[in-house]
Amino acid sequence: MERQACWYSIVRYSPDELSGEVVNVGVIVHSVIHENILNYFLLEETSPKVRPLIRTKSDESTYKSFRDILDYYLKECLNTLDGSVGTLNISSPHSSNFLMELKSFFDNKKMKLSEPTFALSSDIYGLFKALFSSYVGEKFYPISDKELNVKHVARKIFEDNQFLNVKVKQDIGIYPFPDLPLKINVDFGFKNGVWNYMQATPEIKNSSKNTEWFAKTKFLIENVKDDAKVYLMYRKSALHEKNETIDLINYFNNNEERVFGMDLDDQRKVQTLCNKIEHEAHLLEEVI
């Protein structure tokens, strides 16, 4: 497989400049060649590696604040062309300078990024895992169900079945309007005569975010080809009680014949999808 150019930075946290104590708490890998890939993981304030840095409630709040700002920005910035997330506009994730400008924004703060480093890899996600294990620690890599978000769980399923990059493509860019630089990012897809797009549902904790996700998902469904199918992936076990997300997924599932809700906690449904991919999906080298 062709090697892809990317940049990576190590996320570091220093609670007290006078003590000089610095701890690696995350990794960010970014690539804009072929497909826009932004993969990252940041340790929670409850992580055993972070806890020694936290001596007071104020220390905990400070770390959590920096982590939440960076985490939220990285989650949301890919949905915009210029990288604006609310009132925060750091850099466009579609620019090769994204990590450099992100680093500049966090310079002189307690949480900061290392100088971006260039790399070539045929497996960006494999590189990410190796970097995380090396710089942060393999034992801190998210492996439990509670730590893994929907996209990570889906990716692990496709990796375990040896579908990823063979029959299942990741990080697909769809340009609905040829004359406009507008891009829809889809997490995974496979083709069995028609494209089947698989989109991870993010953790949504309030009604305004539900409205935003609903609008983005509706835009995706309306702008893929008429014969394409869309799977909305979620984890029922990760949804909070009275969460409205499942209602929105059911709405699309009931009102769009080509849209399917996919609970990754339902092993029967997961196995049915994997069987479909194994027996029907084309090899990517034949369709791309």
Image (tube, rainbow, N blue to C red):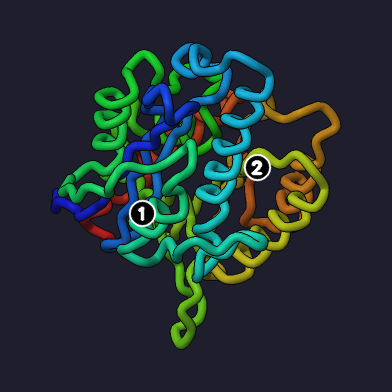
Task: Tell me if mark 2 has few (under 14), some (14-19) or many (20+) residues whose alpha carbon lies within 10 angstroms of its own.
Answer: many
Residue 221, horizontal then vertical, whole percent: 62, 63
Looking at this rendering, what residue extends furthest in the bottom direction?
179
Is 92 in front, or is 33?
92
Left-right relation of 232 to 107: right
Q: Amino acid at mark 1?
A: Leu
Residue 21 in sight in this render:
yes
Q: Which residue is mark 1?
A: 99
Looking at this rendering, what residue extends furthest in the right direction?
242
Residue 157 in sight in this render:
no
| Vertical order, 254 against 262 (above or below) | below
Residue 1, horizontal then vertical, whole percent: 14, 48
Q: Amino acid at mark 2?
A: Gly
Q: Which mark is residue 261?
A: 2
Is 79 in front, or is 10?
10
Looking at the image, which residue is at 25% across and 24% down?
134
Please tell me whether mark 2 sits on a helix, a strand or a loop. Answer: strand
| Vertical order, 27 against 222 (above or below) | above
Looking at the image, which residue is at 34% across and 26% down?
160
Quarter in which the C terminus is drawn: bottom left
